[in-house]
Amino acid sequence: MSVLAEMRSKLSKTWPFELLPPSRWSAQRPTYRDAAPAVIGAALRRSQARPSGNWYAFGASESIRTRPVGAVVAGNELVAWRGADSTLHVGPGACPHLGADLSTGKVDDGVLVCSWHGLRLSGGCQLGWAPYPAYDDGVLAWVRLDAVGRQTPTESPVVPERPDGARMHAVTRLVGTCEPRDVIANRMDPWHGSWFHPYSFTKLDVLSSPPASGEVCETSDRFLVAVTFRIGRLGVPVVAEFTSPEPRTIVMRIVDGEGCGSTVETHATPLGNGPDGLPRTAVIEAVIAHSDRPGFAHAVRGAPLVTPFMRRAATRLWRDDLAYAERLFALRRSALNRNGDPRA
């Protein structure tokens, strides 16, 4: 090995970045021939057929602390709070007495107290008010709504495998005019990455994708992508896989390269219809960063300084991708209207 090659080898172990040469956006290799609608559509149909256990992610775990928090899932008004032992509680958002908004109440020693007349709700059934099953996975808060999901309920949600060891996470939430399936479909088109998000991705190559028909085993039902994450003129090359463990979740996991094991979980939660009668969907994205580099454990201690930048990057991507998802919904709704379908 030459001295120069040896120096490069040593540097690659301590410095994960590569200098990206100047390039023109329009000079990229077109990917429209590869992004076959049949492949994307088949992957989406398989995703939508998987069981969810009727669980819905509705917010960041850390956003529920000493005060009650209001949320809406599929038109259902919810309130969430922490018990005396920090256990997550979720229930209907309207007080069973006269309908007050329980998220405006107080938490007293783990008991939710209504601000109108002082009714105390400890998380059990009272005056016809009953809590919903809730789950806190340490990153996201979940609620189980059996009347909405109408599937066989499960004890816990389908939480994707997360990296072990030192890690930091950030949760971002945006809302779009579309249905959850449109959010999932967006992520099942990795071919758009370097065209639609050139500020974040370059050198993107889809190494493998699931077939458009026939039986697909679970391990093969994935998109495997080689991509370089762009940070200005610097790039971090990785290989990532995209999988969908349940109908409203899609996961990107780095399987090779810097940050191997890190995940980006995208959860699509229906909110109900807006004032215009069109559906709204919340994109709740959890970025869970991990690295085996010794210095990463020190970086985790600076998470409060780093996570705002993680949220900002995710927000920028999803502002673009929600436009994509909203466009998919608008086109589908227009087609239904032309066919006289009452679902439109």
Image (cartoon, rainbow, N blue to C red):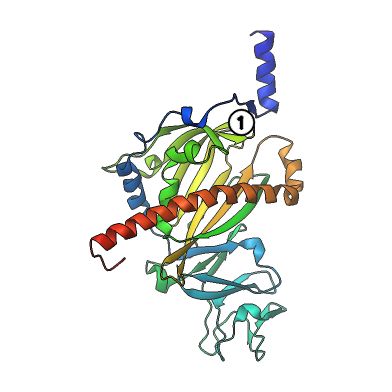
Q: 125 above or below 257?
A: below
Closer to the camera in the image, 25 or 235: 25
Q: Residues within 10 Å of mark 1 (few under 14, many from 20)?
A: many
Left or right side of 333 for 1:
right
Residue 115 drawn at (x, y percent):
67, 86
Report the residue at 43% width, 48% height from top: 186
Quarter of the rendering occupied by the N terminus? top right
Tell me where residue 262 appears, x and y as whole percent.
58, 42
Residue at image x 74%, y 52%?
304
For residue 246, say whether it is visible.
no
Q: Is 208 left or right of 98, judged from the image as shown?
A: left
Q: Tell me the residue at 44%/36% (across/down).
A: 224
Q: Is residue 41 left or right of residue 285?
A: left
User: How many labels, in total?
Assistant: 1
Residue projecting furthest to the top: 2
Q: Visible in this render: residue 143?
A: yes
Residue 53, percent across and down? 43, 63
Extreme-left residue of the structure: 339
Q: Helix, strand, or loop for circle 1? A: strand
Q: Is 269 or 337 nearer to us in this picture?
A: 337
Q: Position of residue 290 (x, y in %)?
A: 64, 42
Q: Residue at x 58, y 63 (%)?
A: 59
The residue closer to the viewer here, 115 or 1, is: 115
Q: Which quadrant of the structure image shows residue 210?
A: top left
Question: Which quadrant: the C terminus?
Answer: bottom left
- The residue closer to the viewer here, 235 or 218, is 235
User: As displayed, is residue 136 above or below residue 42?
Assistant: below
Answer with the quarter of the image where residue 63 lies.
bottom right
Amino acid type, residue under disc 1 in the picture: Gly
Task: Please name the residue that numbered disc 1 is placed on.
Answer: 235
Picture quarter containing residue 214? top left
